[in-house]
Image (tube, rainbow, N blue to C red):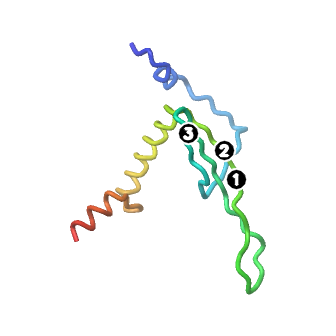
Amino acid sequence: MTTDPREFIKNFPLVAHHNIPETFADGISLTFFDGNTLRLELTAARIDELKPQSQPTGGRHLVCRLVLTAPCAVDLINHMRRITAQLEQAGLVKTEKAKAESAKAN
């Protein structure tokens, strides 16, 4: 029997709250780990109305500040590693390790 409370929590049923809005982000402006929490600031680029014969203008807008406990950050990292492996297997991304191995083979 484990005494780690996170193990008990993983078995709790998930209660969906449908009133929580979805947040779109296309960038990360800040990542910071202070030893206890991982802080992420997510951004979205918004383009101003396009004008003929001029460069597009706009701004990066902060859309979410997310703070995770260290164990939750580790869980996120593990999930992202699995997603990265799936994307790599599908040929959609190449990790630095795969790029280095490919360069050695050539």
The residue where tag 1 is placed is 62
Q: Quadrant of the C terminus?
A: bottom left
In the image, 91 versus 50, the foreground residue is 50
The image quadrant of residue 20 is: top right
Q: Is residue 89 left or right of residue 56?
A: left
Q: Which residue is at 76% across, 70% downward?
A: 48
Residue drawn 73% across the image and 83% down it: 54
What type is the residue that disc 2 sits on? Arg
The residue beneath circle 3 is: 38
Q: Position of residue 8 (x, y in %)?
A: 49, 19
Q: CA distance from mark 2 to mark 1?
A: 8 Å
- Report if the CB atoms under discs 2 and 1 are less than 8 Å apart: yes
| Vertical arrangement, residue 84 with respect to residue 93, above or below | above
Badge 2 or badge 3: first in the primary sequence: 3
Residue 41 position (above or below residue 51): above
Q: Tell which of 43 and 85 is nearer to you.
A: 43
67 relative to 41, above or below: above
The residue beneath circle 2 is 65
Residue 35 relative to residue 18: left or right: left
What's the distance in space between the residues labelled 1 and 3, CA to CA?
17 Å
List x then y, in percent, for residue 105.
21, 67
Q: Name the quadrant of the N terminus.
A: top left
Q: What residue type is disc 3 on?
A: Leu
76 lies left or right of 100: right
Q: Residues within 10 Å of mark 1 (few under 14, many from 20)?
A: some
- Amino acid under label 1? Leu
Residue displayed at 41% across by 56% down: 87
Where residue 51 appears, x then y in whole percent?
Answer: 78, 80
